[in-house]
Amino acid sequence: MARRRPMMAANWKMNKLLGEAREYVEQLLPRIEGVEGADVALFVPLTALSEVVRLTEGTPVLAGAQNFYYKDSGAFTGEVSAPMLLDVGAGAVVVGHSERREIFGETDEMVARKAARAVSAGLLPVVCIGETKEERDSGGMWEKVSGQVRAVFEHLDDDISGEAIVFAYEPIWAIGTGDTATPEDAQDATGKVRGLLGELRGEDFAGAVRILYGGSVKPGNVEEIMAQEDVDGGLVGGASLEAESFAELVNAAANV
Ligand code: PGA
């Protein structure tokens, strides 16, 4: 089966004021000029989103948000909707990041509704899944991760293509800790997720879905992680905050 097109995605989390966002994009673009072998996405704070869209216009960089709410409008103080993200030119959105699930109480059900609404709105959702250290140590990794994946498919339309959704396997114990999963762990989990996607929606669908790995990805480990058969890219926090190191990651992904 042909390899899926790699994707390298930056998750800035709650970092960067407008001036810093501008400076970053200005530093990044020349460093990834001419890179053709990978998709590049920047998931930025909402306050910087319009500006990042504007600065990346006409480039292959996809600008996106880190969260949204699945209703389109109404009395939901503090939230933004898919039409609002499209309105400012966003093309993608992170859904169900473990920080949203753990700090802000997002449930599998909410994550599933968000993923479904993103797809129906034409935004590319990057749906995060992953287990805690305790779950891994007690042998519960697959129960947790498979439950998260199954929940998403309870709300997704039957006829969507595999290209319309991206998953990011992010073991929570590897996020921001410097403690990366081994390439074998990353392959084991992403391979199992792809197998489950095949059971749920068939082999063609499963073969087209991109599954990223996230959790302390950096220039020093990106190549061995990207070399895994079922890992199609990275969702990167810490090492995405400097344009120079993120550009290295993009170049590594494009050269797989
Ligand atoms: P990290 O974060 O690269 O800093 O571990 C990854 C993420 O949370 O998406």
Image (cartoon, grey):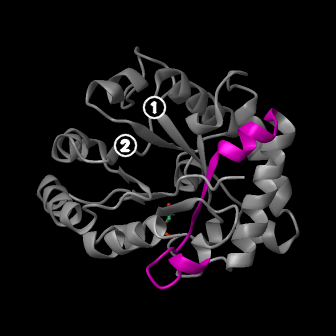
Mark 1 and mark 2: Cα distance apart in space: 9 Å
- The magenta stretch is 201-224
Most distant residue in the top direction:
74
Residue sitting nearer the eye, 131 or 190: 190
How far across and how far down the image is residue 43, in percent? 37, 50
Residue 96 versus residue 159 in the image, above or below? below
At x 56% / y 31%, what residue is drawn? 114
Q: Residue at x 29, y 60 (%)?
A: 15
Q: Residue at x 23, y 41 (%)?
A: 53
Vertical comparison of 152 with 157: above or below: below
**Label 2 near label 1: C-beta < 8 Å?**
yes
Which residue sits at x=66%, y=65%? 171
- Residue ID for mark 2: 64
Assess mark 2: CB under 8 A from ligand 1? no
Q: Amino acid at mark 1?
A: Leu
Mark 1 residue element? loop
Outermost residue, front side: 2
**Does the magenta-highlighted stretch encompass residue 212?**
yes
Residue that badge 1 annotates: 123
126 lies above or below 243: above
Q: Is mark 1 within 8 Å of ligand 1?
A: no
Task: Give 115 or 27, whichever is nearer the viewer.
Answer: 27
Task: Indicate whether residue 234 is drawn in magenta.
Answer: no
Image coords of residue 199 (percent x, y)? 87, 40
N-terminal label among 1 and 2: 2
**Disc 1: CA contacts within 10 A as few (<14), some (14-19) or many (>=20):** many
Amino acid residing under circle 2: Gly
